[in-house]
Image: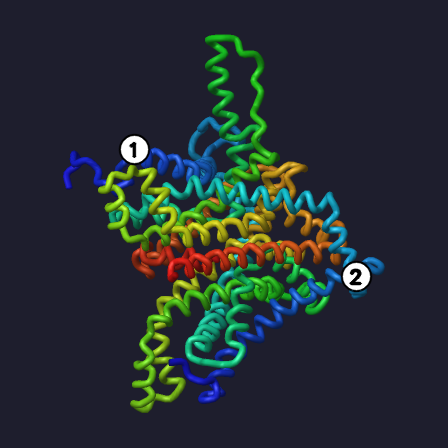
């Protein structure tokens, strides 16, 4: 197609009103983030005027022990809760895919609950649970002091992993499993050599989803965290309440870059986002 | 065909047991306790007795709190409507883009969605606050304009800590929630129907409202639901961007638990919010079921 051919009837992307609209939405979504990142390098505390390039706010952020500790906490929580979520999510997905059993619809519905229940309600539940039923011992050594937050994160992450894995298992040919059994493979062998290889892409996708969900969570952590277990979002929240500082910009920029890298990895592993975006929209429901 | 659980009881128990126990202990039990609290009342500072009272619910329906419920629903509805209006052309453009452009556009929509909510809210604060980017740009233009004609002293725009900022923030945060399900619904449309409509002389707008919207209705409905539910329970956006009069339910709940120390009342409010969420889901499910029956019949 040459550039001069008029746009086809359905090529909305080549029509100027739609292009203008897209550009507007793009600016709306990205201008605040780009400004935030750009001004983390600006050598001036409060002015919009560009005063020159500097890394001093990064230096400050790196020397802020509270911020670094919160960042390390967040990454630790995300890593541990991802591993647990993937294991639990894969197990429940496997059970629901393979078996017929009484009460299956109840399990199915129960598994959807942590996904649909408003965050604040689940946060309240966690606050009450860890205050009254299972008081998490104070002053435990790191990383055991993060246990309560990890439990909370696994609880809202593993149902998402289960959704992703189940969607993948729907395309599995059950005859392969039967063939493996016919050929003499035991339960363990069948799962390890036949089912797991088919599941792997969804495990990776589920893990990345769980990791981002954990890193992103503020509300539920806010209700679960004690004074000595501050995560990155909780720390940024307390900093933002007082003032807007380039230091927060710098720390945020680091997290944004980390997110972009993770998303890029996820897309590389999953292939074309056009093929998976639909499923993704559904997951969040 | 699924296997009966009786054929491999050990595998069944090993696979379903741990996740189920986790779900019951760390989700169902906490929610059940909150539910029980909603029928109790405070005795002393930390003790709560379960008396089966409905006083907490009665208090939640007093005008003061009812107003906040209505306001939250209204704010969430307005956010959803704005997301739909803003997001629909975007989803439409992505649907009919070339494969390569589609990949990039979807990536651009999904990236903010993956970015930390707190960071996005903070970015908006930096744009909107009194000495934020918008006001600084406005002041700069004002100063330039003053050189031509005297305009008087510069008055910064009050963009932050009001209802406008809350709606803007909610739309900013939830736009991808709307675009992705819309796109996945539009992408499944039979494009020849649209071409037929255009060929037969209907204009683009007419094709849009008579063909595209009815066919994509289930996707639109799920987009509305996926946007409305988190917007209704939003805590962070009204907390950081709102003023004293822009509180939503979640802020009131948080206050009961963290500051007012009235857990039974907070529990009742939480469950009312949860029931509202379930009602929204049920309405959507009923509507989509009705649509399906219509389609079959």
Cα distance in 3D space between marks 1 and 2:
62 Å
Examine the image and state in which quarter residue B210 appears: top left
For the N terminus of chain A, the quadrant is: top left
Q: Chain of mark 1?
A: A
Q: Which mark is residue B117?
A: none
**To which residue does mark 1 refer?**
A16
The image shows residue B44, relative to residue B67, as above or below, that is below
Return the residue found at the far top: B149
Q: Residue at x 50, y 12 (%)?
A: B146
Looking at the image, residue B199 sits to the left or right of residue A69; the answer is: left
Residue A86 x/y as whole percent: 46, 69
Q: Residues within 10 Å of mark 2 (few under 14, many from 20)?
A: few
Q: In the structure shown, which secondary structural element does the residue marked by tag 2 occupy?
A: loop
Q: Chain of mark 2?
A: B
Does the rendering let one see residue A34? no
Residue A196 x/y as whole percent: 37, 75
Looking at the image, residue B238 sits to the left or right of residue B177; the answer is: right
Q: Nearer the viewer, mark 1 or mark 2?
A: 2
Residue B67 x/y as whole percent: 68, 43
Q: Residues within 10 Å of mark 1 (few under 14, many from 20)?
A: few
Q: Which mark is residue B53?
A: 2
């Amino acid at each position: 197609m040459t550039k001069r051919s008029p746009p086809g009837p359905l090529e909305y992307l080549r029509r100027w009103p739609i292009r203008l609209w897209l550009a507007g939405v793009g600016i709306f979504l990205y201008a605040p983030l780009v400004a935030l990142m750009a001004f983390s390098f600006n050598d001036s505390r409060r002015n919009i005027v560009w005063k020159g390039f500097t890394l001093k706010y990064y230096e400050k952020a790196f020397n802020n022990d509270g911020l670094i500790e919160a960042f390390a906490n967040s990454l630790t929580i995300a890593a541990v809760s991802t591993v647990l979520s993937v294991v639990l999510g894969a197990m429940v997905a496997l059970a629901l895919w393979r078996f017929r059993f009484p009460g299956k619809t109840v399990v199915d519905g129960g598994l959807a609950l942590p996904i649909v229940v408003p965050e604040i309600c689940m946060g309240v539940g966690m606050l009450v649970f860890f205050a009254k039923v299972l008081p998490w011992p104070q002053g435990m050594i790191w990383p055991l002091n993060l246990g309560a937050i990890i439990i909370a994160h696994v609880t809202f992450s593993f149902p998402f992993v289960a959704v992703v894995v189940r969607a993948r298992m729907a395309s599995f040919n059950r005859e392969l499993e039967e063939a493996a059994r016919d050929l003499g493979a035991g339960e363990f062998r069948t799962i390890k050599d036949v089912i797991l290889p088919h599941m792997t892409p969804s495990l990776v996708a589920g893990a990345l989803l769980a990791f981002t969900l954990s890193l992103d969570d503020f509300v539920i952590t806010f209700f679960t965290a004690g004074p000595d277990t501050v995560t990155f979002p909780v720390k940024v929240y307390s900093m933002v309440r007082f003032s807007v500082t380039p230091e927060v910009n710098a720390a945020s920029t680091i997290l944004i870059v980390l997110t972009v890298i993770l998303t890029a990895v996820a897309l590389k592993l999953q292939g074309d986002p056009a093929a998976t975006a639909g499923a993704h929209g559904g997951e969040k429901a | 065909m699924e296997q009966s659980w009786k054929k491999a009881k050990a595998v069944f128990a090993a696979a379903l047991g741990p996740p189920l126990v986790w779900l019951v202990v760390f989700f169902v039990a906490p929610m059940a306790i909150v539910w029980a609290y909603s029928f109790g009342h405070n005795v002393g500072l930390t003790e709560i007795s379960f008396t089966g009272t409905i006083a907490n619910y009665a208090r939640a329906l007093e005008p003061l709190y009812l107003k906040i419920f209505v306001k939250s629903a209204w704010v969430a509805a307005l956010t959803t409507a704005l997301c739909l209006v803003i997001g629909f052309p975007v989803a439409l453009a992505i649907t009919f883009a070339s494969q390569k452009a589609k990949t990039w556009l979807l990536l651009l929509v999904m990236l903010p969605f993956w970015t930390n909510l707190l960071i996005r809210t903070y970015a908006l604060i930096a744009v909107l606050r009194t000495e934020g980017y918008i006001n600084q740009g406005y002041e700069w233009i004002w100063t330039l304009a003053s050189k031509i004609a005297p305009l008087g002293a510069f008055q910064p725009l009050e963009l932050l800590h009001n209802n406008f900022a809350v709606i803007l923030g909610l739309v900013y945060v939830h736009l991808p929630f709307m675009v992705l399900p819309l796109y996945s619904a539009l992408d499944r449309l039979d494009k020849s129907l649209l071409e037929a409509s255009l060929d037969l002389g209907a204009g683009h707008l007419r094709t849009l409202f008579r063909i595209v919207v009815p066919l994509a209705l289930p996707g639109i409905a799920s987009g509305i639901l996926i946007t409305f539910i988190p917007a209704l329970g939003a805590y962070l956006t009204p907390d950081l961007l709102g003023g004293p009069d822009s509180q939503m339910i979640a802020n009131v709940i948080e206050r009961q638990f963290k500051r007012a120390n009235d857990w039974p009342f907070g529990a009742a409010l939480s469950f009312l919010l949860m029931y509202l969420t379930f009602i929204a889901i049920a309405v959507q499910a009923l509507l989509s079921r009705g649509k399906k029956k219509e389609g079959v019949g």
